[in-house]
Image: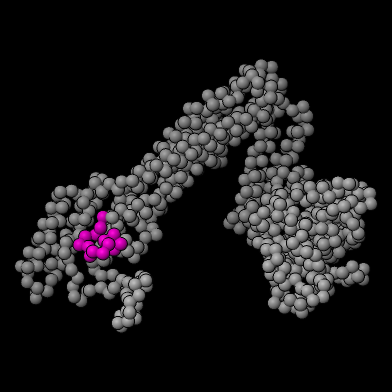
Amino acid sequence: MEPLIPVINKLQDVFNTVGADIIQLPQIVVVGTQSSGKSSVLESLVGRDILPRGTGIVTRRPLILQLVHIDPEDRRKTSEENAIDGEEWGKFLHTKNKIYTDFEEIRSEIEAETDRISGNNKGVSDESIHLKIFSPHVVNLTLVDLPGITKLPVGDQPKDIEFQIKELIIKYISNPNSIILAVTAANTDMATSEALKVARDVDPDGRRTLAVVTKLDLMDAGTDAMDILMGRVIPVKLGIIGVVNRSQLDINQRKCVADAIRDEYAFLQKKYPSLTNRNGTKYLARTLNRLLMHHIRDCLPELKTRINVLSAQYQSLLNSYGEPVDDKNSMLLQLITKFAAEYCHTIEGTAKYIETTELCGGARICYIFHETFGRTLESVDPLGGLSTIDVLTAIRNATGPRPALFVPEVSFELLVKRQVKRLEEPSLRCVELVHEEMQRIIQHCSNYSTQELLRFPKLHDAIVEVVTALLRKRLPVTNEMVHNLVAIELAYINTKHPDFADACGLMNNNIEEQRRNRMRDLPSAVPRDKAVAGGSQSGQNVSEQTDSGMGNWRGMLKKGEEFAAGDRPAALYPLPAMQQKGYAVNLLDVPVPVSRKLSAREQRDCEVIERLIKSYFLIVRKNIQDSVPKAVMHFLVNHVKDSLQSELVGQLYKAALLDDLLTESEDMAQRRNEAADMLKALQKASQVIAEIRETHMW
């Protein structure tokens, strides 16, 4: 999972090249009040003094800080290629390929770039500064440093400075893919923490918030932060980590960060010995790295989907430019008709543009039905999740307090329904896959079949919306039908089904043959005439039952069979030792099933039930495998095909919508270039995600 953070760094670099902020990437956003110790926390994570210092608002622009851990071999290779003297260096986005090895120069550049955009009057700007730090002493992290929360303007600051800063903070922490690092000083009241308050506004459940308590060494004498760090004052789901920053005197005396971290550890050992391993800068860095990696892993599927959607949109936009339209009525009707026809042709396999790299349209739907869905059903074990003890317990529970001569039919129905119910999930998944494919057909038609449509983005979006709405409307109807198909099978267990009756008859013959074999093996001490008489009577019962109805599966069991004295089974649920020795019996004690060898009759009963379940399950599975594709075709695919054009004409072919739907952009050339650049960035981002997907089996 470690390489996941560099993946996000790559994605950030990709979108930085086009100056786009359309993808919300996972990152750690640092918030806190002025002088809460935000900058010191960040510098401790970097291990270097890189941030501007001073009184009042020092951070006046968002600083996106990417920490990149480099191995010695990579560092040596990079140093040789770029003539870098040193093991650590930094790069700004706005200075292109310039490399900074002097961290004082990095600080000066941050100050100069801040003044260039925000001015010298302590105003703030939402235009970010991008800085990458390469070092063997850091963990992979992406951090965003924001201006500190303030209440009153100072000097020539704008009067609405509080509102500006809060709006800027909200903009970044509202990103659902971000982790909020709320910094609060230990010598202030935790209950009035502005950082935690603003974090709770956008993250009420606290799933994305981690609290950092600074200045543990500056608390009043006789007090400590034990309750705060243990979460007894303000609980925070991701945790609360305490740190000790350098004092202003330490900074003035050029105390290095490494020495400060050693002093921090000594302080925690002395003041909070039981919490030392869960606090401190090093623990904070490891925790942030772990949280960010897990967060990235959870966000990658959504990012991939978002990138794919945006890629499709920008591809459509890039191909959407053309000549002005004279007859808008005719053009609109023509485009709608052509799109509907191409959509249907793609499903039927008669489209003009045939995809050669992958299955699409009707071919993929056929694949879903007969390969994906069919194989999934065939892979469902008829007895999956059903142990012999489960079967035996069901048989006993169905007999109630009376010993049973036959296997209760209720137990068979209970168990077979439980197994049949397992077919519902893959059936509904089949509907979902077909629905997704029909959604993909929209983009296929836009990319290959109806290039003229892409000249008009609003019309294209409207058509996508109408088709998507139509598909969405049919989805619950189709799901309901598929659900009913399984419910129908569960509603009535038809033991008279011809295939099931044949299976019962075959098993009856097998059991009768086994009985005859046992009769031949009886010892000579047993009177043969009595055994034969008893066997004939039992055989007559089986024959009668078989003749009266092959579906009566209880005919497979012989009435009145008893266990041999030497084969009498031990209790399945043995009594507690105290009860066996004559102690008072506690009826509230529930016996616990234990593993043991089943008796001959129990083994036979379970085997019969399992065979019956398997036989009936295969019948139902065959029915479901046949009926679900038919239901999907009728209620979803064919319905959409038949009603698509009328739906599009009814929703879009209106005089009031003509001008709006067929409006072309005035700055078409500029938009074309921008769309091309963005599409290239999205494609590169998609490749980055594909690489990590292949490498890490995500």
Q: Position of residue 340 (x, y in %)?
A: 55, 27
Q: Position of residue 526 (x, y in %)?
A: 9, 73
The single residue placed furthest to the top in the displayed view is 327
Depicted 170 relative to depicted 667: above or below? below
- Residue at left offset 22%, top offset 74%: 567
- Residue at left offset 84%, top offset 53%: 151
Residue in the foreground of this view, choosing between 465 and 95: 465
Q: Main secondary structure of the magenta part?
A: loop
Depicted 555 relative to depicted 401: above or below? above
Q: Does 402 lie within the magenta span?
A: yes
Quadrant position of the N terminus in the picture = bottom right
In this figure, what is the number of numbered marks? 0
Q: Find residue 262 and report its image quarter.
A: bottom right
- Residue at left offset 89%, top offset 60%: 53
Q: Find residue 576 and report its image quarter.
A: bottom left
Residue in the foreground of this view, choosing between 4 and 692: 4
Q: Position of residue 493 (x, y in %)?
A: 30, 48
Side (left or right) of 498 relative to 329? left
Note whether residue 621 is visible.
yes
Q: Does 412 lie within the magenta span?
A: no
Q: Position of residue 555 (x, y in %)?
A: 19, 55
- Residue at left offset 60%, top offset 24%: 652
The single residue placed furthest to the bottom in the displayed view is 581
Residue in the foreground of this view, choosing between 452 and 115: 115
Residue in the foreground of this view, choosing between 99 and 477: 477
Q: What kind of colouring is applied to the model shown?
A: one colour
Side (left or right) of 522 relative to 307? left
| Magenta region, residue range | 396-409
